[in-house]
Amino acid sequence: MPSFDTVCEAKMVDVKHAIENTSKEISTRFDFKGTPASVELKDKEITLVGNADFQLTQIEDVLRNKLTKQSVDVRFLDKGDVQKMGGDKVKIVIKVRDGIETELAKKIQRIIKDSKIKVQAAIQDGKLRVSGTKRDDLQAAMALMRKEITDIPLSFDNFRD
């Protein structure tokens, strides 16, 4: 039975390169000299540190530009709230999405079921496996998901015929 997996995974190597390039640019820019401005990646969380909110915004803009140059969709980023640190420093934690959340997977499942396409969707730990009897039905399901789900970048892999 033909099937494919719907996933939401960023290429962490490209994210790491973008963060390294952002860090280099921050260290050489004149407006960041003498400030605690920095970017770090731990696990799947990016931490931006700066003196004020506007500085965090500038660092985030640089990061988004570098991610775009590395062909990483910025919709993978889940921005948190600005937090105060000791002294006059502030930080923000941006999470890199990995996997499809259960609520979104259920929403996609409902969209597929309501479309009357003859495929089944099953949620499997951060992935959504779609299977059907015809390859054309699977391609129609892919097109439907691309059209309906625009807030996160979905990719399709593990296509089996």
Image: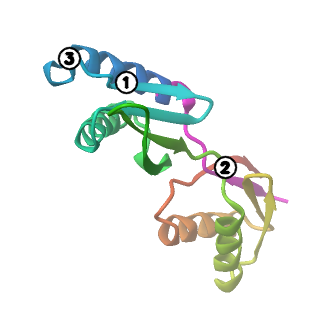
Q: How is the image coloured?
A: rainbow
Dot placed on the residue nearer the N-terminal end, 1 or 3: 3
First in sequence: mark 2 vs mark 3? 3
Magenta span includes 160 = no
Q: Secondary structure at mark 2?
A: loop
Q: Which residue is mark 1?
A: 38
Label 3 sits on residue = 33
In this rendering, which labeled residue sits more in front, label 2 or label 3?
3
Left or right: 47 in relation to 159: left
Examine the image and state in which quarter residue 51 appears.
top left
Q: Residue at x 71, y 81 (%)?
A: 113
Count the marks: how many?
3
Amino acid type at mark 1: Ser
Q: Residue 45 versus residue 85: which sits nearer the camera? A: 85
Query: Could you tell me the amino acid type at mark 2?
Result: Gly
**Label 2, residues with CA under 10 Å away: few <14, some 14-19, many ≥20:** some
The answer to which of marks 2 and 1 sits earlier in the sequence is: 1
Q: CA distance from mark 1 to mark 3?
A: 11 Å
Closer to the observer: label 2 or label 1?
1
Please give left or right for residue 84 compared with residue 154 in the image.
left
Segment tinted magenta in the rendering: 1-14
Q: Residue at x 25, y 36 (%)?
A: 55
Residue 40 place in picture, x, y as percent: 47, 25
- Residue for badge 2: 99
Residue at disc 3, secondary structure: loop
Amino acid at circle 3:
Lys
Q: Quadrant of residue 117?
A: bottom right
Residue that appears at 27% across and 15% down? 27
